[in-house]
Amino acid sequence: MEQDTQNPEITVLYQNPFSPVKEISLYIHIPFCTKKCNYCNFYSISYDAKLAQNYIRSLTKEISQYKNKHYTLASIYIGGGTPSLLSFSLLFSLFYAINDTFTISQKSEVTIEVNPASITRDRAQNWKTLGINRVSIGVQSFDDNVLKILGRFHSSKDIKTTVELVKTHCTENISLDLMYGIPGQTLETWMNSLQRAVDLKPKHISSYCLSLERGTPLFDSRNKYSFPPEKLQKDMYYSMLEFLESNDFLQYEISNFSHEGYESRHNISYWKGNEYIGCGASAHSFYNMTRRENISDVERYIINIQNKQSVYGNSKVIPGREYISDMIFLGLRMTKGVSLHYLKSEFGFDILAEYSDTINKFSKLGYLTVEKDHLKLAKKALFVSDEILSEFV
């Protein structure tokens, strides 16, 4: 085992002996949950110990397919689902395969998503042993009534316990996920959740407006609830911006805030258009200018792996022009915006000329601005960003 002397929280179990030729990010999808939340439309299924064992066995085989690529991992993100349900032995098998396949630098960011109801001291200690140095906790709200509406099975008290366990036994690099625009939520209860989140001293906060998705229990029962009107949602968003800024959280993306130096490097890599590999059922990848999506069926995924068949549901080669549009669309989500010089020097693309009508229209409305060679969204545009960004696709 190799220990990072500069950051003792980062542990590398095994080091790939090959010389790296490319830096890339890795996403691992763990689709198991104790119970599916009322608002969630991500692919997930109920946890079953035997199925989870077979899934991890298949997942390690998919990972090993990249062994001769000689990639160095800039970041690893284990999402779901609820990855924190996995036992240490299953996680160890997963990390063994990752370390045996890729080079993991001592500076790699390694994140696991967790649910507050699935944390124990032993699990937190095991994560640290495996080299996990960032923990993203799905809090959503500190209001127990709101948590019930969302179908969460943790309480507000569980959140504090979880944060304390992770800080004590794994890492202080904690991110909290919060949600607003929820039925029954008021500006007062929303600000109370933000205050309680800040009081726990996380390094990072992500916050998203509830989106009603077809096929979810909350969508099907939407007529039973009174949702905050758009004006109130807007007030919630901009009140959050002001509050988090006053507590030294820097906004670096529309929905993401951190103390300096604790931005999510994995997500920033996405927004910059960098390459990433996704492994597991329903995982997405982008490398060699090709987007791939794995099949969203755990049992079929396992069978395909066992039979040495492809697990891709579909794939698409991305033309250069489409890739540039994606870079602009994603780059404008970040507060730094999109570098005009970079697009021109790397791709010969003049965004001011190519999108002159769109830029002029939104600039006149005060939604877009050019500052220090960067095209960026103005603050007033952040809440209505989807409408603006869609015109760059």
Image (cartoon, rainbow, N blue to C red):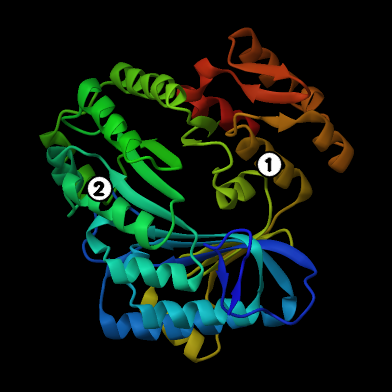
In the image, residue 134 sits, relative to residue 231, either above or below, namely: below
The quarter of the rendered structure image containing the N terminus is bottom right
Q: Is residue 345 left or right of residue 215?
A: right
Side of 356 where 378 appears, left or right:
left
Q: Residues within 10 Å of mark 2 (few under 14, many from 20)?
A: some
* Mark with earlier residue (1, 2): 2
Q: Nearer the viewer, mark 1 or mark 2?
A: 2
The local secondary structure at tag 2 comes to: helix
Q: Residue at x 42, y 56 (%)?
A: 135
In the rendered image, residue 233, in percent from the top left (x then y), is placed at 32, 23
Q: Give coordinates of residue 45: x percent, y percent.
A: 29, 68
Residue occupying image coordinates x 38% and y 83%? 89
Q: Which residue sits at x=80%, y=75%? A: 19
Q: Is residue 1 left or right of residue 179?
A: right
Residue extending furthest top? Answer: 364
Q: From the image, tell me which residue sits under label 2.
A: 160
Determine which residue is flagged by label 1. 327
Q: Is residue 199 above or below residue 233?
A: below
Callout 1 touching callout 2 (CB < 8 Å): no
C-alpha distance separating marks 1 and 2: 38 Å
x, y percent for residue 157: 17, 47
Residue 149: where, in percent of width, then height? Answer: 15, 42
